[in-house]
Image: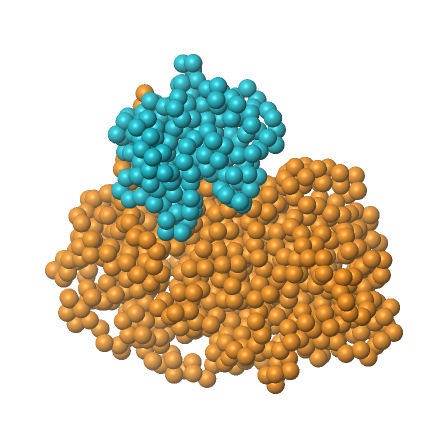
Chain colours: A orange, B cyan
């Protein structure tokens, strides 16, 4: 946190309370605007709050005086990397520069983008990171990560309908992983389950590089009608500013500036007070109250309180509106009466929202809140003029132009340099690694790959998540994409996939981001959906390291170029930087989310084999590509060479083909091939319902099984001729692999893998690592037993 | 047929229960915990969720909601009541069903497709099943472990009031694999698994859950 390693270790809150005191505190004085004007040379703890000297100077320049302590608090959180995107902004502009899309109703800049999915429905979706808090306090960090992204979706006017989680930890057998992972999983589940949102999928991956920096990325998706879209702006002089939801407490103070925007430092102070504590019950009430408020048209603008709390909500609402705003801060309901004004402005207490309400509608608004036992308080109003002013017991403690807080923060063009080790890394070709030479070795490698923690059965995690609530979940993990019905009459629905292979991105961040996009795109298409829009969560190390900044810039450029080629808009995203401990940054981890639409979810395509006697076909072409592969990583602990080649035209043709095959009901299953290649894909499809297959692999069986060539999918069909004809027409290569049936995966003339053996290996890994009860194997659901009278 | 579905603060599966009533051919009637109005319903479903955030004890606060006083009174007069998951916890806390639901033995929330054996096919809510029938419906809970003293459990079994038992694995450590129980008159049933999540091939592991709702509709017609 500090250059000299000693002096800067006062915590952010200690830095504040030295100067700033409210009623209830013993110390000296309230730092008002007048006082600040009269004491221009008072020293302020800007460095402890995460501001650089030149940023502090700029604040003085904007205000024409030193900031008050409350103003300093607001600027410090809003100009943090987390809130201001000051290092990433110059790169992220490429997403906004993508060609306009008819599907995009609301673009980047609002809380979440909104996409037209047909029939008058709009969908909003977004991923957000809660990486740093989850390392400090795994349960609460992960729980409030879910809570925060759900409020972002709610703020757009949508009913949240599902969540997903993308998780990364250090080595699976590392002691600290056993501390962090169970808490994170319980936190994601505990919050989402209690909110009544089905968890429909995600990722769980392990790598040494995340040992001190686990990644917890949470996605939420919500649905509304076009006309119900809400925006975060304060309009209409005299309209009331209403804070509603939980009381404000001392939790999460400085979360965005101290936690999320600095690297961890072994010598640093305890950061636990900077982690928020969640109450999903209150959030559930907040959701229902908000939806009732939206339905009755009671708000003109709304914003959730997440990172940077009231500082963010008030300045963003005022900045986006046409007027100013005044807030009487002493009216904010508190959990802790000793909080100072600056602490109240910085607090990241969860489950709070801020609405702009016409005076005539205030009574109705408060009545809805009372019905749902939600505390609601008028704390201010929209003013004419262009200032955001905050009073504390009648004394002015904030008087700022809101745009300078919310939207005109610092912007950096950080220096960038290609990592010095990249040439050597790329030259270290995985194709030169020793390959299995016998059938027995091939089988051993197969079992090793599918039972590795990254590839193994995720039931230990997903059993802790409710996938059924709301009754619209059509597909969920372990299928390639989550599919949710949004209209019970028309059966219209959506599909979502999240993918972020960081090994590829380490080898080539430009290509890696595109490969992740391609995989998520393919996973959505495999479910039978038409891909429509993209979101992202970009997890990287410190932007102050030129090599990290280069990785970031390359990944953004790759993603933007990939989206342009696929014709998909980027609807928004999230950047998480400073994921590094000391000098060691995580592998660049761009997690990409793709949303697709199903015109009729009854035509969804599952990934598991259900019936014997069907033909197994491979769509797409396989080349010997092992750079960054699961095989190289699991069997050799190797990361090097080039990632597999990207062919977005082939991905597009494959997606179109899958859409056509799904519409004509020509295939009974489809499964994407990615990490672990065909070996992994066959294993998952076979184990789903305990149906094996007899297959013949032409050419080199090792390459066929473990190459991670892209644009490939395995399908099953009872009409191979029909599929082949359609594929030929679509220009997608088809290879017939064999026939489903039996209780083993049999490679003719090569090996025979009994399903019981592969299932035992595949299911044992996570329970063995993370304990818990015996975890029964999945069983085949018997044919419908609808009672008859 | 009017089947009420109560919404408490924190109820989650109320929309699912209403859908199940509708697909079975009934008319779902939303009931609000804070009212004293059962709206002339013919039966009541207490849905799953985390009423009042499961604070204090799961179901403890909801059991004292205004509407629950009316439910208790009418249930004692024979109104059919089904409690699912959190609703089962509420019924136990309200004294309408015996026993208690405690933290799962393995301490995790667990969601899986569960095999149940129907022990009683003559209650108001299970008449469309056969005794001994195996059905598959989802279970999902963190506090679903059914417990009681040995004497109480012996009496319960002696009175033949166990309606469902877990088969092929007990998901939460419930005593004697008990998944659901009934009142003496067979008109009140509570269970931890979720029949309302097994009513459509599209979204559930089976359609085995529909029988709860078709059963009660027939009994109401017959009454």
Residue lying at 50% horizontally and 50% vertically, measured from the top left: A192
Q: Residue B192 placed where, x, y %?
A: 40, 38
- Reply above or below: B188 against A531: above
Q: Nearer the viewer, residue A716 or A742?
A: A742
**Residue A636 sits in which quadrant?**
bottom left
Residue lying at 39% horizontally and 55% vertically, measured from the top left: A461
Residue B77 in view here: yes
Q: Residue A756 placed where, x, y %?
A: 20, 53
Q: Residue A495 placed where, x, y %?
A: 45, 48
Q: Would residue A400 be found to the left or right of residue B27 on screen?
A: right
**Residue A46 sits in which quadrant?**
bottom right
**Residue B40 sits in which quadrant?**
top right
Q: How many marks?
A: 0
- Reply above or below: B214 against A676: above
Residue lying at 30% horizontally and 53% vertically, measured from the top left: A774
Position of the C terminus of chain B by quadrant: top left
Residue A521 in view here: no
Q: Nearer the viewer, residue A311 or A619?
A: A311
Q: Would residue A622 be found to the left or right of residue A8 on screen?
A: left
Q: Residue A590 placed where, x, y %?
A: 48, 66
């Amino acid at each position: 946190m500090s250059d000299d390693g000693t002096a800067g270790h006062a915590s952010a809150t200690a830095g504040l309370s030295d100067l700033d005191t409210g009623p209830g505190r013993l110390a000296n004085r309230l730092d008002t605007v007048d006082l600040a004007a009269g004491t221009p040379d008072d020293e302020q703890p800007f460095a402890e709050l995460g501001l650089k000297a030149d940023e502090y100077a700029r604040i003085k320049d904007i205000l024409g005086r030193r900031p008050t302590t409350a103003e300093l608090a607001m600027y410090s959180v809003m100009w943090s990397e987390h809130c201001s995107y000051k290092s990433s902004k110059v790169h992220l502009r490429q997403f906004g520069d993508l060609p306009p899309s008819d599907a995009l109703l609301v673009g980047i800049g609002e809380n979440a983008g909104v996409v037209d999915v047909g029939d008058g429905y709009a969908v909003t979706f977004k991923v957000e990171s809660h990486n740093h808090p989850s390392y400090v306090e795994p349960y609460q960090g992960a729980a409030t990560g879910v809570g925060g992204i759900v409020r972002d979706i709610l703020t757009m006017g949508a009913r949240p309908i599902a969540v997903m989680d993308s998780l990364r930890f250090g080595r699976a057998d590392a002691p600290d992983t056993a501390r962090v992972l169970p808490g994170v999983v319980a936190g994601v589940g505990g919050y989402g389950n209690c909110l009544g949102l089905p968890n429909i999928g995600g990722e769980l991956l392990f790598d040494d590089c995340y040992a001190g920096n686990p990644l917890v990325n949470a996605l939420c998706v919500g649905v509304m009608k076009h006309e119900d879209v809400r925006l975060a702006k304060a309009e209409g002089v005299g309209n009331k500013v209403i804070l509603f939801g939980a009381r404000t407490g001392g939790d999460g103070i400085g979360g965005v500036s101290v936690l999320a925007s600095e690297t961890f430092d072994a010598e640093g102070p305890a950061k636990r007070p900077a982690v928020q504590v969640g109450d999903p019950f209150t959030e559930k009430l907040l959701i229902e109250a908000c939806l009732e408020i939206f339905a009755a048209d009671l708000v003109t603008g709304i914003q959730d309180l997440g990172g940077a709390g009231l500082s963010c909500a008030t300045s963003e609402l005022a900045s986006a509106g046409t007027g100013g705003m005044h807030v009487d801060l002493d009216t904010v309901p508190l959990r802790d009466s000793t909080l100072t004004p600056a602490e109240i402005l910085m607090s990241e207490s969860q489950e709070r929202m801020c609405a702009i309400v016409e005076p005539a509608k205030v009574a109705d608004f408060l009545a809805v809140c009372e019905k749902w036992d939600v505390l609601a308080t008028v704390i201010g109003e929209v003013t004419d003029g262009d200032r955001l002013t905050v009073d504390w017991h009648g004394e002015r403690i904030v008087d700022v132009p809101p745009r300078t807080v919310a939207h005109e923060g610092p912007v950096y063009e950080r220096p960038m340099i290609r990592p010095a080790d990249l040439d050597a890394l790329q030259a270290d070709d995985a194709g030169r690694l020793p390959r299995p030479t016998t059938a027995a070795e091939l089988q051993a490698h197969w079992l090793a790959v599918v039972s590795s923690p990254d590839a193994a059965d995720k039931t230990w995690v997903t059993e802790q998540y409710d996938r059924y609530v709301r009754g619209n979940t059509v597909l969920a993990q372990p299928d390639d994409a989550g599919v949710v019905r949004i209209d019970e009459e028309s059966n219209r629905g959506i599909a979502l996939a999240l993918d972020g292979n960081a090994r590829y991105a380490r080898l080539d961040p430009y290509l890696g981001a595109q490969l992740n996009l391609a995989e998520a795109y393919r996973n959505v298409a495999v479910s039978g959906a038409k891909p429509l829009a993209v979101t992202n969560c970009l997890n990287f190390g410190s932007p102050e390291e030129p090599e990290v900044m280069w990785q970031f810039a390359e990944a953004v450029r790759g993603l933007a170029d990939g989206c342009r080629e696929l014709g998909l808009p980027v609807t928004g995203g999230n950047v998480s930087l400073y994921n590094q401990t000391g000098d060691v940054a995580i592998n660049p981890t761009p997690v990409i989310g793709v949303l697709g639409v199903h015109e009729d979810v009854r035509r969804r395509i599952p990934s598991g084999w259900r019936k014997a006697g069907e033909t197994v076909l491979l769509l797409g072409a396989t080349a010997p590509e092992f750079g960054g592969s699961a095989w190289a990583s699991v069997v050799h602990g190797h990361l090097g060479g080039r990632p597999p080649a990207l062919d977005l035209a082939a991905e597009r043709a494959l997606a179109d083909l899958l859409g056509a095959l799904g519409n004509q009901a020509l295939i009974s299953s489809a499964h994407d091939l990615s990490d672990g290649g065909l070996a992994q894909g066959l294993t998952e499809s076979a184990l789903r319902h305990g149906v094996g297959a007899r297959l013949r692999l032409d050419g080199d069986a090792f390459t066929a099984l473990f190459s991670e060539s892209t644009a490939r999918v395995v399908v099953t069909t009872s009409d191979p001729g029909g599929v082949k004809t359609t594929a030929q027409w679509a220009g997608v290569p088809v290879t017939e692999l064999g026939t489903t049936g039996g209780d083993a995966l049999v490679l003719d003339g090569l090996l025979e893998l009994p399903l019981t053996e592969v299932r035992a290996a595949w299911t044992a890994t996570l329970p063995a690592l993370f304990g818990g009860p015996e975890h029964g194997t999945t069983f085949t659901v018997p044919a419908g037993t609808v009672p008859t009278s | 047929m009017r089947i009420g579905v109560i919404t408490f603060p924190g109820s989650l599966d109320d929309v699912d229960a209403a859908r199940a009533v509708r697909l079975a051919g009934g008319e779902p009637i939303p009931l609000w915990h804070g009212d004293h109005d059962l709206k002339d319903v013919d039966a009541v479903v207490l849905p799953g969720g985390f009423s009042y955030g499961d604070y204090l004890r799961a179901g403890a606060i909801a059991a004292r909601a205004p509407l629950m006083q009316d439910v208790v009174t009418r249930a004692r007069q024979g109104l059919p009541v089904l409690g699912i998951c959190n609703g089962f916890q509420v019924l136990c806390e309200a004294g309408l069903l015996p026993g208690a639901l405690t933290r799962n033995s393995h301490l995790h929330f667990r969601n899986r497709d569960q095999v149940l054996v129907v022990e009683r096919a003559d209650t108001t809510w299970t008449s469309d099943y056969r005794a001994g029938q195996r059905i598959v419906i989802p279970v999902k809970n963190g506090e679903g472990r059914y417990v009681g003293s040995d004497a109480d459990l012996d009496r319960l079994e002696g009175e033949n009031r166990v309606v469902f038992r877990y088969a092929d694995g007990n998901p939460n450590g419930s005593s004697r694999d008990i998944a659901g129980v009934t009142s003496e008159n067979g008109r009140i049933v509570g269970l931890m698994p979720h029949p309302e999540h097994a009513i459509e091939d599209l979204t559930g592991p089976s359609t085995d859950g529909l029988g709860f709702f078709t059963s009660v509709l027939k009994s109401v017609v017959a009454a």
